Image (cartoon, rainbow, N blue to C red):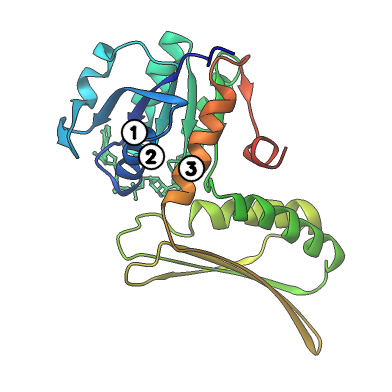
Amino acid sequence: MVAPPPIRLLVHGASGRMGRALLRLVAVDPRFELAGAITRAGGMVDGVRCLPAARIAAALPFDALVDFSLPAAFDTALEVCLQRGIALVSGTTGLSPAQCKALALAAQSIPLVCAANFSLGVAVLHELVARAAAALPNWDCHLLETHHVRKLDAPSGTALALGQTIAAARGQAPHYLSLRAGDVVGEHHVQFTGAGERLELIHRATDRDIFARGALEAAARVAGRAPGLYALGKLLLG
Ligand code: NAD
């Protein structure tokens, strides 16, 4: 059987912690071909020549854009995908309400996956907290997230997404607590406290590659698909 042609990827935010993980994984994954890489100012990143964001319109043809950048950079990524009718997989967190609205609108024109956390473990955690929140509507619920000191947004996008899952299941959002410490990749600790007992659900990320792998899996599944907002949990957990 002839293998399908590789999916051509544009990596947006290529010089960041996540962008560099993506470049490294794409280079060894036969499902993909790197069509280009974008950073704020352009230049070389780990041997890859990157276009500056201002010249994104000059990017070679691509089948999906994977974006792990910053909210200030996100609009350009969405715009180029809309102009070309191409899939967008975005992990950028801290988007404004107006940007979230623009995403929802864009889903009418292009395939989209947008998630605050691309790990398989957190996809399962959403299912577990929904079950616990529905069963324990009157217990106190706290959500503690810990990240490295360079993380800009708080609470984390993952904490807010888990909070939405909890609120949908029990009608009340959790209390959020955020810690910024050292080089912690990401920890989310959901605690339900009742009289005389406590239930804790914890996810610890120790390696950024888990997010990059999840985003690549999503890109492989939505490139070339019909327009729509695809839920990551359904894509990863089937
Ligand atoms: P980083 O600060 O290390 O990298 C940011 C990148 O954005 C850099 O490559 C920078 O050049 C680029 N950038 C900045 N301004 C730009 C512009 N105007 N145009 C184009 N590119 C621009 O950040 P990081 O740790 O790699 O994280 C990136 C984002 O991904 C953050 O929002 C973070 O919270 C999020 N994140 C999401 C997940 C997830 O699973 N969804 C996981 C980890 C991080």
Query: Which residue is the extreme one toward the left?
Result: 43
Going from N to C along the chain, the mark reached first, 3 or 1, is 1
Task: Please give the residue where the numbered disc 2 appears in the rendered image.
Answer: 25
Q: Circle 3 — which element?
A: helix
121, above or below 184, in the image: above
Query: Which residue is the extreme one toward the front?
Result: 1
How many numbered marks does the figure carry? 3
Task: Please give the residue where the numbered disc 1 appears in the rendered image.
Answer: 27
Viewer-nearest of labels 3 and 1?
Answer: 1
Q: Circle 2 — which element?
A: helix
Residue type at mark 3: give it.
Arg
Residue 55: percent from the left, percent from the top? 21, 18
Q: Which of 139 and 210 is in front in this view?
A: 210
Q: Is residue 104 visible?
A: no
Q: Which quadrant is home to the C terminus?
A: top right
Task: Please give the residue where the numbered disc 3 appears in the rendered image.
Answer: 213
Residue type at mark 2: give it.
Leu
Crowd tier of the residue under label 3, counting other residues whose Cα lies within 10 Å: few below 14, some 14–19, many 20 or above: some
User: Could you tell whether 223 is left or right of 40 in the image?
Assistant: right
Q: In 3D space, how far apart are the residues under numbered discs 3 and 1 (Cα atoms)?
A: 12 Å
Q: Nearer the viewer, residue 112 or 155?
A: 112
Do the CB atoms of the residues marked 1 and 2 lie less than 8 Å apart? Answer: yes
